[in-house]
Amino acid sequence: MKILLAAGAVFVALSLASPCFAQTQFSTEQQAQQHCPNDTIVWLNLRTGVYHFRGERWYGMTKNGTFVCKQEADQAGDRATRNGQ
C-alpha cells in the first residue's frame, strides 16, 4: 500500500512539473494549417510548453518542437512566449 501511495505521489509531482502539450502535433506548418484552417499555427517548444508565432526568433527553430494549432495549445495549458522571441 505504501508503495502505491509513493508511486502516485511521484506521478502527481511529475505531472505538475511537466508542461502540457497540444493534442495534435505536426512536422510541417502546412499539415497543421490543414488540421485547423481557421486558427493560428504556432511553434511549440515541447520541453518548455512555450509557443512562438511566425516571425518570432524561435519559430520553427527549437530542437524539441512541433507545429500546433494555437487554440489546442491554449487548451492544453501551453503559453505564448513572454519576450516576443
Image (tube, rainbow, N blue to C red):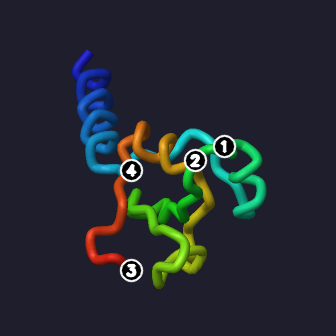
In the rendered image, which residue does mark 4 sit on?
Answer: 78
CB within 8 Å, label 1 to label 4 = no
Alpha carbon of mark 3 to alpha carbon of mark 1: how far? 24 Å
Q: Residue at x 32, y 31 (%)?
A: 7
Badge 4 crowding class, 10 Å Cα cut-off, few under 14, some 14 to 19, many 20 or more, is many
Q: Residue 65 or 12: which is nearer the viewer?
A: 65
Q: Are marks 2 and 1 in contact (CB under 8 Å)?
A: yes
Q: Position of residue 55 (x, y in %)?
A: 52, 79
**In the picture shown, does residue 56 fall above or below 51?**
below
Q: Label 2 neighbourhood size at 10 Å, few (<14), some (14-19), many (20+)?
A: some
Q: Tell me which residue sits at (34%, 68%) in the image.
A: 81
> In the drawing, does residue 64 fall left or right of residue 2?
right
**Label 4, label 3: how many angstroms apart (C-alpha)?**
16 Å
Q: Residue at x 30, y 27 (%)?
A: 8
Q: Nearer the viewer, residue 6 or 25?
A: 25
| Residue that mark 1 sits on | 36
- Residue marked by disc 2: 39
Q: The residue under label 4 is which amino acid type?
A: Asp
Front tag of 3 and 1? 1
Q: Nearer the viewer, mark 2 or mark 3?
A: 2
Of callouts 3 and 1, the N-terminal one:
1
What kind of element bears circle 4?
loop
Instruction: Determine whether 59 is above or below 80 in the image.
Output: below
Q: Quadrant of residue 79?
A: bottom left
Quarter of the image with the N terminus is: top left
Q: Earlier in the sequence, mark 4 or mark 2?
A: 2
* Residue at x 28%, y 38% (from the top left corner): 10
Q: Looking at numbered disc 2 in the image, what kind of residue is underneath it?
A: Asp
Residue highlighted by disc 3: 85
How far across and down, in percent of the image, does residue 63 sit?
Answer: 57, 76
User: Gap in Å between the C-alphas at discs 1 and 4?
Assistant: 17 Å
